[in-house]
Image (tube, rainbow, N blue to C red):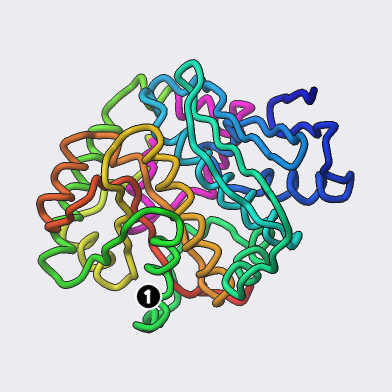
Amino acid sequence: MSTATGGAARGTGEWSAAESVVLSRAVHHAPSVHNIRPWSLTLHDRAAELRERPTVLVQHDPDGRDRRISCGTAVANLVLAIRGLGRTAEVVLSSSAGLVVATATSTGRAEPTEAERRRGAAVLERESYRKPFADAEVPEQVRDALLEAVVDGGATGRWITGADESLGVAQLLCYAARVFHDNPDYQRELHSWTTAAGGSLRWDALGERGLAAVGLTTSRTRLPDEAVLASRIAQEAVLVVGTRADQPLDQVRAGTAVQQAWLEATSRGLVASVSTQPLHLVEVRNGLAHGLGFAAAPQILVRFGYPAERR
């Protein structure tokens, strides 16, 4: 019988010691809300079980949306790691005591696809990039590949295009930024998670301009003019990722889909950052779906581009 701890635990099954290290390392490098890794990993037989762990983000993540999206990114990394070992990976999502459980089972050997190889190799390179992008458009064929990766992950996506859509999205994001900026309880909790207060967030890692700035609104955020924000959204490749429904397992699928697209982008020399905080407000989610004619429940906004400086 294997045991699990916060983060990753190695079981006593058929996974070798070397394989266990590969799987644990891949999961460890998945992006998560406030870098808190709200999951545990247990390895046993030829299965890997990733279980959602409760967190104490009362103001920031009251319904656990970000926590489950984070678990989804870890599932994506886990599956790619198993596939990178030359094994099959069948994932079953379930819930136990109100918490999500993802079980990836390997029943045999199978070589990974070229896309899986690319994305798996990008796991350790992926990073959040909240700075302005270089002045270079993301080619249409690359956008198509990123959308395909989202679909591979079990979700759907839609690019924000044109001045009208950019302005509509900017208005919703500015509204959300004002709500969180003026919420003292939210701001106190956010401050407690910064490095200055012994937490895991760095103030200087947060965005200061455009979509990156209003994605996680702090007391220091300078709320942008709607027209200025709309102009910056129009200049970037911004993807809305959604799911057919909006239940806990759908939020996990959204996280898996975004991570697949993020790794695909990394493998092609792009950088990205995600925004979920505005979508905690139901009126923002509904406004996005209605304004964009998006026949899905919006879960995440992702901005893609090329880095402005040499990496």
The residue under label 1 is 143
Left or right: where 213 falls relative to 206: left
Q: Secondary structure at mark 1?
A: helix
Residue 196 seen: no
Identify the image quadrant of the C terminus.
bottom right
State the image quarter where residue 84 is shown: bottom right
Left or right: where 78 falls relative to 179: right
In the rendered structure, which segment of residues is drawn in magenta?
A: 189-218
The answer to whether residue 305 is magenta is no
How many labels were placed on the picture?
A: 1
Q: Position of residue 32 (x, y in %)?
A: 54, 41
Residue type at numbered disc 1: Arg
Residue at 45% across, 29% down? 190
Q: Nearer the viewer, residue 140 or 171?
A: 140
Q: Nearer the viewer, residue 112 or 66?
A: 112
Q: Position of residue 118 (x, y in %)?
A: 62, 71
State the image quarter where residue 263 is shown: bottom right
Residue 46 seen: yes
Residue at 37% across, 75% down? 143
Identify the image quadrant of the N terminus.
top right
- Dot 1: within a 10 Å radius of its alpha carbon, few (fewer than 14), some, or many (20 or more) residues? some
